[in-house]
Amino acid sequence: MDMAPNGVSEQPRWLSDDEQRVWRAYLHATTLLEDHLDRQLQRDAGMPHVYYGLLVQLSQAPRRRMRMTELAKDAKITRSRLSHAVARLEKNGWVRREDCPSDKRGQNAFLTDEGYEVLRRSAPGHVAAVRQALFDRLSPEQVGQLGEIMRVMAEGLQPAGPDADLPWLR
Amino acid sequence: MDMAPNGVSEQPRWLSDDEQRVWRAYLHATTLLEDHLDRQLQRDAGMPHVYYGLLVQLSQAPRRRMRMTELAKDAKITRSRLSHAVARLEKNGWVRREDCPSDKRGQNAFLTDEGYEVLRRSAPGHVAAVRQALFDRLSPEQVGQLGEIMRVMAEGLQPAGPDADLPWLR
DNA sequence: GACCCTTTGTTCAACTTTCAAGAAGCCTTA
DNA sequence: TAAGGCTTCTTGAAAGTTGAACAAAGGGTC
């Protein structure tokens, strides 16, 4: 083993004790928060957090409508998942689909008035939950640090443009 | 509206622009990472991240076995979810169940040799993925900050002991 | 022991997510 | 305009998750 100096399969560099503690804290905190928000929204708005996020995106888009692919990209979910999700939200009457005029393959999803209303009603509770878990507990410095850390993390994970798998071209 | 000064339903305190940016960065980064790890482990170890975590827990327990409830608690999942997960891992031959000698209601889950082997083989790749996404990108200061921030977050979300819903007793 | 309340782990049905496949429209090139 | 390749969105089946309900055993009290 220990193949070549190209960084592919050297001896694994395990995490230090400190790093392990941080990693566990990360997993612990992020799953607790996600679970908390999921339950809160399921209870108060009748949908999971991801679906709520879709309504939020739509509510902020011009004319409250978006192409499916764009919406999927912004919400970081697959188109397949979005299809199923929108079908469900459509059943609730919160979203509807319409053909895209300029591209016959395309669909626009748009937020109905009823959907907007659900959002309006549940937003305060959601914000309160986020505040209570995060912003009301962290110092302003910590909020800044968190933002920067998350920015760095995302940078390393970004689907990245074309040529993402051709790093030698960059 | 605006009921009473007990903090229950005042005017919602929306997030500031800065807070919103941080919150979005948080959602973005954490979902990207979780997706990344899920795919990595699904590909290299044949199971999702949560299941992998269960094997890790078992591998570190004395005699590589744990009571179901304890395992569920440590992994922060419901007993129901754990039942399903262990059933699946049992089919793979990576985990087995045995009756608990001291409590006839109880079950111990234990890691088989085969399960241990899977873990041994896939651990390096997993650690590499975590490193590459997180620890190799953050400065030591940032790692420290992240740890502290996550600790604070978890504190506010912890299922908390008994009396969790009786805050006035604390 | 009889009673009652709690804990343990599983099960079922409903729901969500994933993955692979596929129909349909777009776009470029010849 | 035909051909080939790409993009858009959906579908269906398998896998995973949730929440409520349940049987069985523990543990206290009378």
Image: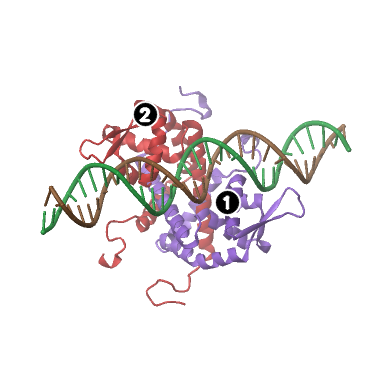
Chain colours: A purple, B red, C brown, D green
- Local SS, label 1: helix
Amino acid, disc 2: Tyr
The residue lying toward the viewer, choosing from A88 and A6, is A88
Residue at position x 51%, y 29% in the image: A8
Q: Is residue A138 visible?
A: no
Let me know if marks 2 and 1 both belong to one chain. no
> Pointer 2: what residue?
B116
Query: How many tags in the picture?
Result: 2
Q: In this view, does A129 lie above or below B7?
A: above
Q: Measuring from the top left, give residue C15's x and y in whole percent.
A: 51, 51
Residue closer to the observer: A5 or A37: A37
Residue B111 at least partly seen: yes
Q: Which chain carries label 2?
A: B
Q: Which amino acid does label 1 sit on?
A: Ala
Q: Identify the residue position indicated by label 1 in the image.
A: A85
Q: Residue A67 carries which label?
A: none
- Tell which of A108 and A144 is nearer to you: A108
Residue, x 40% and y 40% (percent of image)? Answer: B84
* Residue neighbourhood size for the residue with mark 1, other residues' Cα within 10 Å, grouped as few (<14), some (14–19), many (≥20): some
Q: In which quarter of the image is residue A120?
A: bottom right
SS assignment at label 2: helix
Image quadrant where one finds the N terminus of chain A: top left
